[in-house]
Image (cartoon, rainbow, N blue to C red):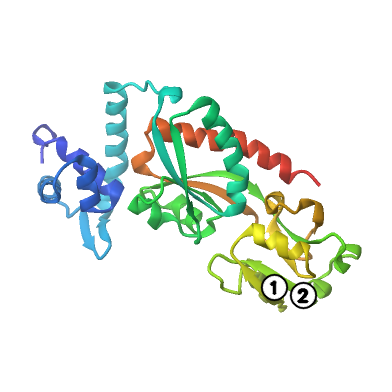
């Protein structure tokens, strides 16, 4: 294969298919038919002498050669796009709708500041919130159901750090820690919180899936201990209400206690055992990485709200 005879348009198609991991979605992005996209990939395969993309039940999977090739193709196309169409984004004149997925507690921090900025800086921007009921938001991003996800996605973040072929991008916004939360007049609020009285209490678990087993239970099992989970809920706001009006205790990220709306009725104590840090990550799809409007949104979330989170997390 000679580079002089290579049709460079095929690289645009290759980039779109790698980004979408699906021929049909890539065709829609390129305003082409699906057979035309398939034909372009076939021609590129013949030129490069590699299968490049293997069909699966859910789309296509890149070969090792495709994974090595894509970063260089993506960087070259990004450079050309920037040279041909210089960025002239004016947020005050922008018209866009963002679909975002967050847990209720995270949204309670992010949305007030975001709405103030939109009202004052970007009157043509709208936001549509989508329920986040999983620690695995990548399928929603791949399907285009959402433009951005913000939350605690430990397994996802770890995989993305080592997977250069994934079209999902991520950025860490904040790192905090878990604490034990209870009502102000709870019996355990008046004594030292030890392993025995912690395990003897009745517990509430915030679980998106409803499964009565979480990070705390895994840590306790390693220590040969266990607890009784009397109730599971799927919202931090509900957790705060229940704990403030009962003898149940719960474990929450410290920076999210305020989002329960029950700060005046709650107290927190350090846990009598260690847990991994809780990270807040922002995830988005490569298809939106160069969008000026999307860049504005990410920059806003990265800046104003992380300052708020740090201030809350460092308060008593």
Instruction: Out of 190 and 130, give the one closest to the viewer.
Output: 130
In the rendered image, is residue 67 in sight? Answer: no
Image coordinates for residue 291, horizontal then vertical, percent: 37, 33
Instruction: Out of 16 and 205, give the one closest to the viewer.
Output: 205
Dot 1, crowdedness within 10 Å: few (<14), some or many (≥20)? some
Residue found 77% across the figure and 51% down from its top: 263
Residue found 42% across the figure and 35% down from its top: 294
In the rendered image, is residue 280 in sight? Answer: yes
Q: Secondary structure at mark 1?
A: helix
For marks 1 and 2 on the same chain, the one whose residue lies earlier in the sequence? 2
| Image-based side of 240 in relation to 266, left or right | left
Residue found 78% across the figure and 44% down from its top: 315
Between circles 1 and 2, the one closer to the viewer is: 2
Q: Which quadrant would residue 204 be assigned to in this image?
A: bottom right
Q: Which residue is mark 1?
A: 220
Task: Assign the N terminus to one quadrant of the image.
Answer: top left
Residue found 69% across the figure and 76% down from its top: 230
Give above or below for 74 relative to 138.
above
Cβ–Cβ under 8 Å for marks 1 and 2? yes
| Image-based side of 243 in relation to 144, left or right | right
Q: Secondary structure at mark 2?
A: helix
Dot 2, crowdedness within 10 Å: few (<14), some or many (≥20)? some
| Image-based side of 281 in relation to 306, left or right | left
User: How far apart are labels 1 and 2 at the CA level?
Assistant: 9 Å
Image coordinates for residue 308, horizontal then vertical, percent: 67, 38
Q: Which residue is mark 2?
A: 199
Instruction: Out of 274 and 97, give the one closest to the viewer.
Output: 97
Q: How many marks?
A: 2
Image coordinates for residue 62, horizontal then vertical, percent: 26, 54
Instruction: Out of 53 and 215, give the one closest to the viewer.
Output: 215
| Image-based side of 141 in relation to 298, left or right | left
Image coordinates for residue 133, horizontal then vertical, percent: 50, 61
């Amino acid at each position: 294969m000679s580079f002089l005879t290579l049709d460079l348009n095929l690289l645009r198609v290759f980039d779109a298919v790698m980004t979408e991991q699906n021929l049909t979605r890539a065709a829609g992005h390129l305003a082409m038919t699906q057979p035309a996209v398939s034909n372009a990939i076939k021609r590129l395969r013949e030129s490069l002498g590699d299968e490049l993309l293997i069909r699966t039940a859910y789309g296509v999977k890149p070969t090792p050669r495709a994974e090595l090739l894509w970063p260089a193709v993506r960087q070259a196309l990004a450079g050309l796009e920037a040279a041909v169409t210089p960025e002239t984004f004016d947020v005050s004149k922008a018209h866009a709708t963002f679909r975002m997925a967050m847990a209720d507690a995270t949204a309670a921090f992010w949305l007030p500041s975001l709405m103030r900025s939109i009202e004052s800086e970007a009157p043509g921007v709208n936001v549509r919130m989508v329920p986040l009921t999983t620690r695995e938001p990548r399928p929603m991003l791949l399907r285009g159901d959402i433009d951005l996800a913000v939350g605690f996605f430990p397994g996802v973040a770890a995989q993305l750090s080592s997977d250069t072929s994934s079209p999902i991008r991520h950025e860490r916004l904040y790192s905090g820690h878990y604490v034990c939360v209870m009502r102000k007049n709870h019996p355990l609020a008046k004594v030292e919180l030890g392993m025995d009285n912690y395990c003897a209490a009745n517990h509430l678990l915030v679980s998106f899936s409803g499964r009565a087993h979480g990070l705390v239970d895994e840590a306790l099992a390693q220590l040969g201990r266990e607890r009784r989970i009397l109730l599971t809920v799927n919202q931090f706001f509900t957790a705060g209400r229940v704990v403030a009006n009962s003898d149940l205790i719960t474990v929450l990220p410290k920076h999210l206690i305020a989002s329960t709306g029950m700060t005046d009725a709650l107290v927190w104590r350090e846990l009598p055992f260690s847990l991994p840090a809780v990270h807040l990550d922002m995830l988005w799809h490569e298809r939106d990485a160069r969008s000026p409007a999307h860049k504005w949104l990410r920059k806003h979330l990265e800046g104003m709200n992380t300052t708020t989170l740090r201030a809350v997390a460092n308060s008593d």
